[in-house]
Image (cartoon, rainbow, N blue to C red):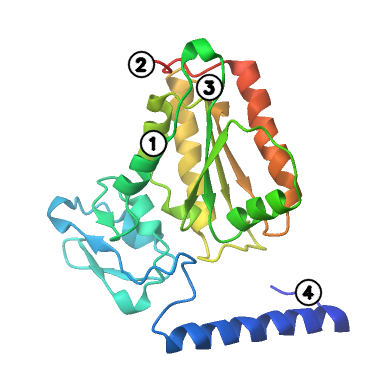
């Protein structure tokens, strides 16, 4: 839904459309896609021997890539696929992966993050961040020399909708004191490059927070934010807000185990 625009806004909007068209033509001539930004040319691979026919991947795919057979097993249509990874994040069996983007790859990145010892009394926060809008905003915050707490570590994701809940479990069990997820804006004025990836991640994380409350582990340790590419000035506020939360609830009780 678009509102009426004045002449200057129309020119800006048209310029953006032309630049996007040029980008599409150039990349198509090279046999590449505009998204993902990582330039990956592979398609998701399905290890269907373990499929439980839960239908989460077919229901959550923003582009209708996955059909189903009579048993409910997904049938990929790669020519529709935009390689967002939402199906990978939806799968509870972790049987969907790309050659260079998978649940195991991100889990290895989580394990590589240094977690301070309990005696050091230093927090460690992990931030899963969408590479389309939010990660460029972090780059811009750095170029603008904005200051925020240095205890945060960023892991870029192809889309926040590709977040698999096992990464949250791995992070907490590793002793991370807080987890931030930053994606594109969703809702009526959505800006998600993959339509509803950010919204799906937000929905999944609500369920995780309910589980944490039942386990008496503070749900405030997980925070989800929406960010436009030009809202780089909010990065320090988001990070520092999490640090204030950790000061309030204390360090992760799993730290050191």
Q: Where is residue 78 in the image (x, y as percent from the top left)?
A: 30, 75
Figure check: 27 above or below 249: below
Mark sitting earlier along the chain (2/4): 4
Q: Position of residue 93 (x, y in %)?
A: 24, 46
Q: Residue 218 carries which label?
A: 3
Instruction: Give 77 or 245, whichever is nearer the viewer.
Output: 245
Q: Nearer the viewer, mark 4 or mark 1?
A: 1
Q: In this view, does 140 lie to the left or right of 204?
A: right
Query: Could you tell me if the residues under marks 3 and 4 are in contact, i.e. CB atoms within 8 Å?
Result: no
> Disc 1 and disc 2: Cα gap in Å?
16 Å
- Can residue 227 be seen in this snapshot? no
Mark sitting earlier along the chain (1/3): 1
> Disc 3 and disc 4: Cα gap in Å?
41 Å
Name the quarter where the N terminus is drawn.
bottom right
Q: Nearer the viewer, mark 3 or mark 4?
A: 3
Mark sitting earlier along the chain (3/2): 3
Mark sitting earlier along the chain (4/1): 4
Q: Position of residue 105 (x, y in %)?
A: 33, 48
> Disc 4 and disc 1: Cα gap in Å?
46 Å
Residue found 42% across the figure and 19% down from its top: 215
Mark 4 neighbour density, 10 Å: few (under 14) some (14–19) many (20 or more): few
- Can residue 70 be seen in this snapshot? yes
Residue found 12% across the figure and 54% down from its top: 49
Look at mark 2 in the image and give the residue it sits on.
257
> Disc 1 and disc 3: Cα gap in Å?
24 Å
Look at mark 4 in the image and give the residue it sits on.
3
Callout 3: helix, strand or loop?
loop
């Amino acid at each position: 839904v678009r509102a009426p625009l004045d002449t200057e806004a129309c020119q800006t909007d048209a310029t953006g459309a032309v630049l996007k068209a040029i980008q599409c033509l150039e990349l198509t001539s090279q046999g590449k896609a505009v998204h993902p930004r990582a330039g990956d040319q592979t398609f998701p691979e399905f290890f269907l021997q373990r499929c439980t026919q839960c239908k989460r991947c077919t229901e959550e795919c923003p582009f209708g890539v996955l059909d189903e057979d009579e048993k409910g097993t997904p049938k990929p249509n790669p020519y529709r696929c935009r390689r967002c990874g939402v199906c990978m994040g939806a799968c509870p069996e972790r049987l969907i992966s790309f050659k260079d983007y998978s649940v195991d790859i991100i889990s290895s990145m989580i394990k590589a993050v240094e977690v301070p010892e309990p005696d050091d009394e230093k927090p460690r926060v992990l931030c899963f961040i969408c590479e389309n809008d939010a990660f460029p905003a972090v780059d811009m915050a750095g170029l603008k020399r904005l200051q925020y707490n240095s205890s945060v570590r960023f892991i870029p994701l192809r889309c926040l909708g590709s977040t698999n809940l096992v990464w949250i479990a791995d992070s907490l069990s590793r002793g991370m004191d807080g987890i931030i997820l930053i994606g594109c804006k969703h809702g009526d004025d959505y800006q998600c490059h993959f339509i509803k990836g950010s919204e799906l991640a937000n929905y999944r994380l609500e369920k995780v927070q309910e589980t944490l409350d039942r386990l008496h582990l503070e749900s405030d340790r997980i925070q989800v934010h929406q960010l436009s590419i030009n809202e780089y000035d909010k990065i320090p506020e988001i990070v520092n807000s999490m640090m204030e939360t950790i000061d309030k609830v204390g360090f992760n009780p799993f730290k050191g185990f």
